Amino acid sequence: MAKRKSNKRAADTQIDVQEVQPKSPPFWETNQNLIMYVLGGIGLIVMAWWGYKELVVKPQQQEAVGAIWQAQVQFDRDSFQLALENPGGGYEGFLGIIDKYGSSKAGNSAKYYAGVCYLHLGDFDNAIKYLDDFDAGGDLLPIMKNGLLGDCYSEKKDYDSALNYYKKATDSGNHDLLAAYYQKKLGMLYDYQGNKEAAREAFERLRKDFPNQTSADWRDIEKYIYKAGGSL
């Protein structure tokens, strides 16, 4: 019995020690300065981003929109060199707008226009440069960007790159009529290279995935399939 009492006394002593052992204070109590620094840093980042958008981005966009319209007029007239460098009236061409307002939405649009201008002028390297820099969003622009890059590389006779971009054009965005146009180009380039099997597969995909009775690219597809060795 004495031994059992001794064990009980030891157990009571252990419990008492655990109960009176001091607990660690919460993290926020011992790290208040660190927490305040972190929260202050986040606040500064948010304020800096807001200030950048309100004081830099928005004014740049407004200025760029006001500057770009004359270059667009020359572009619509197929006066591509003037549109790039000197559209008249003291306005900047697309290249000047890119230099001054490249981070704005209008500056981004100027990159697309510049790429198309250089493509028409036969300067395919600069066309590729500006089209690559163009940030294409939405359903239509990714198709146009990749398709035009395919045209640039095709003109440079870099057919592997051209095929790659025509595939991207077909699979990007969401505009069946434009996607069908580049799917046809994909098949025609395969056919030009003598790859009849790949050409036939491309044309058969056009017939299957992009049916459109109003599209000449789709209505004429049977003859392309037949030319590539397929059955009708």
Image (cartoon, rainbow, N blue to C red):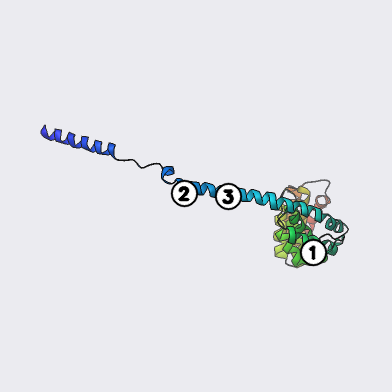
Name which residue type carries label 2: Leu
Name which residue type carries label 3: Leu
Residue 26 lies in what quarter of the image? top left
| CB-based contact (under 8 Å), mark 3 and mark 2 | no
Q: SS class of the residue under badge 3?
A: helix
The residue carrying mark 1 is: 118
Say which of 107 and 128 sits in front.
107
| CB-based contact (under 8 Å), mark 1 and mark 2 | no
Say which of 214 and 127 sits in front.
127
Say which of 78 and 51 sits in front.
51
Residue at x 14%, y 33% (from the top left corner): 5
Relative to residue 34, is residue 89 depicted above or below?
Answer: below
Q: Is residue 194 visible?
A: no
In screen coordinates, is 72 left or right of 173? right
The residue carrying mark 2 is: 34
Q: SS class of the residue under badge 1?
A: helix
Task: Looking at this view, name the residue that lies furthest to the right.
Answer: 77
**First in sequence: mark 3 vs mark 2:** 2
Q: Position of residue 205 (x, y in %)?
A: 73, 51
Residue at x 25%, y 39% (from the top left corner): 17
Eye-nearest disc, 3 or 1: 3
- In the drawing, what numbered circle is on residue 87? none
Spatial CA span between label 1 and label 2: 55 Å
| CB-based contact (under 8 Å), mark 3 and mark 1 | no
Q: Position of residue 136 (x, y in %)?
A: 72, 53
